[in-house]
Image (spheres, rainbow, N blue to C red):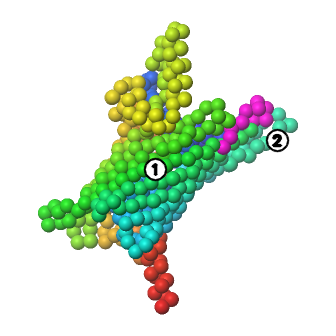
Amino acid sequence: MKFLKKFSFLTLVALLGITENVMAQNDIKNEDFNPVNTGVTTLSITPDARGSGMGNLGAATDPDVNAQFWNPSKYPFTYSRGAVAVSYTPWLRKIVNDIFLADVTGYWKPGNNDIQAISASFRYFSLGEFTADSDNPDVAVQTINPYEFAIDFGYSRKLSEKFSVALVLRYILSDLSFDNTLSGESNTAASAFSFDASAYYVTYPMVGRNECQFAWGVDISNIGTKVSYDHGATYAYLPTNLRLGAQFMFPVADYNTLSFGLDLNKLLVPTMPRQKDYDMDTLEGQTEYEEAREKWENMSPITGIFKSFTDAPGGFSEELKELGVSIGAEYAYNQQFFARMGYNYENAMKGGRSYFTFGAGFSLNVVQLDASYMLATAQSSPLDQTLRFTLSFDMEGLGDLFGKKRR
């Protein structure tokens, strides 16, 4: 049985994350192309329109309902006691029209104080419907509906008036299962558990006569077990990621504020050994490579986190190339109208996913609508012109609104 081109191509694109890697490899045309490989790469896709509109940053941005993905430590500093957001992203729409990411996120501050918050989110990534055909008329056609989802719960708490921490627990399922009736090969659904740990600090310095806001945040996400799609024969690391960010917000006039943010990202995943770094023409070189490959495959995720800072074949200079950079700005008028823009950079040797983003938002009473647009630096990128939409609801405001109506 052979799968249609749509299945084989998009499985690699959406789940192994090689679309722009291949593009970047064609651009640089050398053997130094060495991206960090992980499984369940959809966990790294930005779900909300606000963060994506600012170049994919959010570690230290002004707290909002979508902090679960960026830095859940921000929740105790939100203005409302609770909120829910629904986000939708048509994915790879330049190629197909049935792949999408949907996300629901919410939080609530229990009790009568702003010291703590509980939060949860559910994200679902659908790869659409794929059909397998066969040259053998006696073999039944197989329809496949691969998908991935993650559900998580978090708890955040202030440790002081300016500092907070959070912990998130997550369950992940990646179902790419299929059976090849001719070859006997099959893939199984893969599952994993992970957790996030984060911290957030905010202060309000005086610049001239204006009170400004400065914040920094750190979030380590997807620390957890490996995943396997072939009955445990091989395993892939989760996309464990370190995100460091800072933001400065200041007033520019009455009811007008402007903020600038910066995020740095690094995958805390060990780099896979490459044959080019060994003398494969000799038995000794082949043995060294096989030993390095076996060591990499058997390494625990926790060991891999620490190893990821020093294992790049090119040394410290290559480690620096593994840093992704996001910069962005947001203009707000009376917390009702928002305009955003940003830039995300990834070194071509580590994937080359670089793009500009633009976004806007409008808030009316207890409802806010945000949208973002991605403009890739490479016209051949399948992520070019990606749109995101987020609809948020202030649950405390809704409660007050309906309470007033009942009275």
Asked whether 285 falls inside the magenta stretch, the response is no
The residue beneath circle 1 is 196
Q: Residue at x 20, y 65 (%)?
A: 211
Number of marks in picture: 2
Q: Nearer the viewer, residue 378 or 162?
A: 162
Residue 140's disc is 2
3 over 174 or under it: above or below:
above
Q: Is residue 367 visible?
A: no
- The residue type indicated by label 2 comes to Ala
Residue 368's disc is none
Q: For the residues labelled 1 and 2, say whether their Cβ atoms are less than 8 Å apart.
A: no
99 over 299 or under it: above or below:
below
SS under mark 2: loop
Q: Nearer the viewer, residue 234 or 361?
A: 234
- The residue type indicated by label 1 comes to Asp
Q: In whole angstroms, how far apart are the C-alphas of marks 1 and 2? A: 44 Å
238 over 333 or under it: above or below:
above
Residue 47's spot in the image, x, y percent?
49, 55
Q: Is residue 250 left or right of residue 33?
A: left
Residue 13's spot in the image, x, y percent?
56, 40
Q: Is residue 406 left or right of residue 112?
A: right
User: Callout 2 environment at 10 Å: few (<14), some (14 to 19), or many (20+)?
Assistant: few
The region drawn magenta spans 180-189
> Mainly helix, strand or loop, the magenta region?
loop
What is the quadrant of the N terminus in the image? top right
Q: Is residue 236 left or right of residue 56?
A: right
SS under mark 1: strand
Looking at marks 1 and 2 on the same chain, the residue that comes earlier in the sequence is marked by 2
Residue 149's spot in the image, x, y percent?
59, 52
